[in-house]
Image: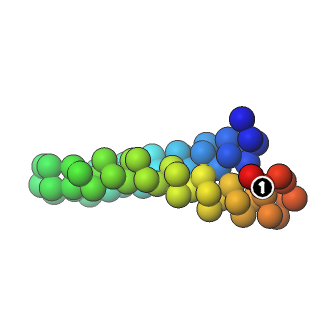
Amino acid sequence: MIPWLAGGYVVGAALTFIFLMILVEDRRAENVYFWRIIALTVLWPFLWVFLIGWLSAKIFGGELP
C-alpha cells in the first residue's frame, strides 16, 4: 500500500470518528441525521485520504500517484 495513502486513511478515519461522535452526541431526534451520518462515514475518510495524504506527500517529498 502507498505510504501516504495509508497515513491519510488512518488520520482521516480518526478525524471522522471524532466528528461522528460529536455529531451523534449532539443529536436530538432519532433518524434525523441517519443518512447524513452514513454519507459522512463513507465520504470523509476518502476526503481526508486525498487532502492529508496529498499535502503530506507534497511537504515530505513522498511519491504521488
Residue 33 shows in this picture: yes
- Amino acid at pointer 1: Leu
Outermost residue toward the front? 65
Residue 39 in the image: x percent, y percent? 33, 52
Residue ID at (60%, 45%) = 9
Residue ID at (82%, 64%) = 59
Relative to 56, 22 lies left or right: left
Residue holding disc 1: 64
Residue ID at (52%, 51%) = 46
Relative to 62, 48 lies left or right: left
Residue ID at (72%, 35%) = 1
Residue 41 in the image: x percent, y percent? 39, 47
Relative to 15, 27 lies left or right: left
| Badge count | 1
Residue 11 shows in this picture: no
| Residue 34, above or below 57 | above
Specify few, some or many for label 1: CA neighbours under 10 Å numbering under 14, 14-19, or 20 or more.
Answer: few
Which of the two residues, 53 or 26, is positioned nearer the viewer here?
Answer: 53
Where on the picture, by quarter, is residue 23? bottom left
Residue 14 in the image: x percent, y percent? 54, 46
Identify the colour scheme used: rainbow
Where on the picture, by quarter, is residue 54? bottom right
Residue 22 in the image: x percent, y percent? 36, 55
Which of the two residues, 1 or 15, is positioned nearer the viewer here?
Answer: 1
Element carrying mark 1: loop
Outermost residue toward the right? 61
